[in-house]
């Protein structure tokens, strides 16, 4: 039997170290990387946050640069203010936040699916409502001990980045099938919102 | 003569390490992973649903634009409407028969390359979608994560359509058209089988 080479042993040791079974606790409130990254990870791991932001980004992008720029400023700013108010003691019942989130999924997804030529004011109002609802829900959902201004800033930075990426992806779309793909995403988001609404009516508050 | 090195034992060791049983409990909030997977599994849990979803995609591909993109945009929404009705407990009798009939009708449409006006195709597909969604909504198990379940459910439904549309793209070739009509016949036979079971 041949002897293993030195390089082979090193690779094996690396593979063993990499694959050693450890529990990956992704949803810990504190990631161990500090409050700013806690905010980023909270947003990134919450589909109730990032899905409507992406859909709104697609919608704003399809409506043009002016709408996209306006929402890029409004969305993170209002999200921040809503979070700040929650940190100061604002309390909204979970069932209200859940229902409003389901409704926002439905409205944003519906507008995107229909590729509605909605005016800037309407889209901005929808965006502002989303920021208020999710800003409050996010800060309500996080354990008090780990809530800080930096956590909120991490969330708002994520909102800004994800929205900017989604809007810029659709701003330059010219091919019909790509626009259709964005609209299909809207249809799926609206469908999720509708199912969520039914779930809330049947079982009560469904998401935080 | 120099002996050739054999890396087999090392590879074997690496494979053994890979096979070490370990539980990857990454997203360990109770019920969430189950919610997404259950949602993803639900539309593909019954063959009667699968054949109808795929048939919608096939028919859309046969009909061409604008049906090919109108159906995947509208169908998930209509199906979610049915799911909503099922969730809130609105009675919709005969849903199992309607689901089986959807396989028969959509299969027959694909088989015969039936080309009705767009609105008739949309109403037909929408009506069947409502019953499919209703059945899913009424059967929804409690105690799951609603958002993740809904995401999985919608994603699986949409992907079944995409599968149908992708298969339907062979329509541009003559033998592809024959193949699609064959699939339509198979779907129709499946629908008849499920209809017989629903009526029994």
Image: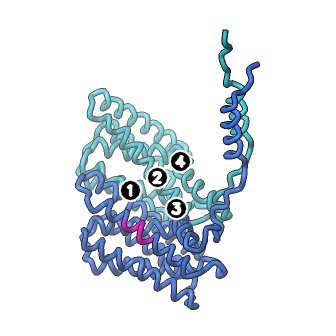
Chain colours: A blue, B cyan
The numbered mark, 1 or 3, whose residue comes first in the sequence reads: 1
Q: Which mark is residue B157?
A: 2
The CA span between labels 4 and 1 is: 16 Å
The residue under label 1 is B75
Residue at image location 33% in from the left, 65% down from the top:
A167
| Residue closest to the eye, B172 or A120 | A120
Magenta-span inclusion, residue A162: yes
Q: Which mark is residue B150?
A: 3
The numbered mark, 4 or 2, whose residue comes first in the sequence reads: 4
Do the residues bearing badges 3 and 4 touch, measured as CB atoms within 8 Å? no
Q: Are marks 2 and 1 on the same chain?
A: yes
- The chain carrying label 4 is B
> Which quadrant of the figure has residue A114?
bottom left
| B14 lies above or below B42 | above
Mark 3 neighbour class, 10 Å CA radius: few under 14, some 14 to 19, many 20 or more: many
- The chain carrying label 1 is B
| Residue closest to the eye, B190 or B45 | B45
The residue under label 4 is B44
The CA span between labels 2 and 1 is: 9 Å
Do the residues bearing badges 2 and 1 touch, measured as CB atoms within 8 Å? yes
Mark 1 neighbour class, 10 Å CA radius: few under 14, some 14 to 19, many 20 or more: many
Q: Which residues are magenta?
A: A159-164
The numbered mark, 3 or 2, whose residue comes first in the sequence reads: 3
Q: Are marks 1 and 3 on the same chain?
A: yes
């Amino acid at each position: 039997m041949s002897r293993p080479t030195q390089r082979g042993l090193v690779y094996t040791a690396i593979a063993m170290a990499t694959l050693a079974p450890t529990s990956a606790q992704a949803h810990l409130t504190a990631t161990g990387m500090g409050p700013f990254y806690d905010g980023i990870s909270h947003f990134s791991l919450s589909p109730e946050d990032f899905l409507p932001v992406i859909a709104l980004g697609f919608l704003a992008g399809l409506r043009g640069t002016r709408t996209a720029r306006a929402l890029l400023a409004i969305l993170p700013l209002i999200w921040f203010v809503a979070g700040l108010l929650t940190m100061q003691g604002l309390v909204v019942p979970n069932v209200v936040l859940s229902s409003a989130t389901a409704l926002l999924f439905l409205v944003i997804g519906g507008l995107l699916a229909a590729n509605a030529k909605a005016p800037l004011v309407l889209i901005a109002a929808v965006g502002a409502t989303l920021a208020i609802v999710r800003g409050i829900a996010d800060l309500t959902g996080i354990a008090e001990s780990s809530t800080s201004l930096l956590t909120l800033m991490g969330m708002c930075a994520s909102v800004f980045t994800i929205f900017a990426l989604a809007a810029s992806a659709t701003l330059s779309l010219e091919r019909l099938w790509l626009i259709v793909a964005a609209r299909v995403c809207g249809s799926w988001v609206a469908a999720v919102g509708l199912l969520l609404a039914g779930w809330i009516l049947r079982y009560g508050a469904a998401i935080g | 003569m120099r002996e050739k090195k054999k890396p087999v034992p090392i590879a074997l060791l690496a494979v053994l390490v890979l096979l070490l049983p370990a539980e990857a409990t990454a997203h360990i909030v109770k019920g969430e992973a189950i919610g997404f997977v259950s949602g993803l599994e639900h539309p593909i849990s019954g063959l009667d649903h699968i054949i109808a979803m795929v048939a919608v995609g096939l028919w859309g591909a046969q009909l061409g634009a604008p049906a090919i993109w109108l159906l995947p945009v509208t169908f998930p929404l209509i199906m979610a409407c049915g799911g909503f009705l099922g969730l809130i407990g609105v009675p919709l009798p005969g849903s199992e028969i309607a689901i089986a009939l959807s396989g028969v009708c959509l299969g027959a449409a694909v088989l015969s390359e039936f080309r009705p006006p767009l609105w008739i195709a949309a109403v037909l597909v929408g009506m069947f979608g409502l019953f499919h969604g209703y059945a899913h909504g009424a059967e929804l198990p409690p105690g799951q994560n609603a958002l993740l379940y809904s995401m999985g459910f919608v994603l699986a439904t949409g992907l079944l359509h995409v599968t149908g549309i992708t298969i339907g793209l062979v329509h541009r070739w003559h033998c592809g058209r024959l193949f699609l009509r064959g699939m339509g016949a198979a779907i129709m036979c499946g629908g008849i089988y499920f209809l017989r079971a629903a009526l029994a």
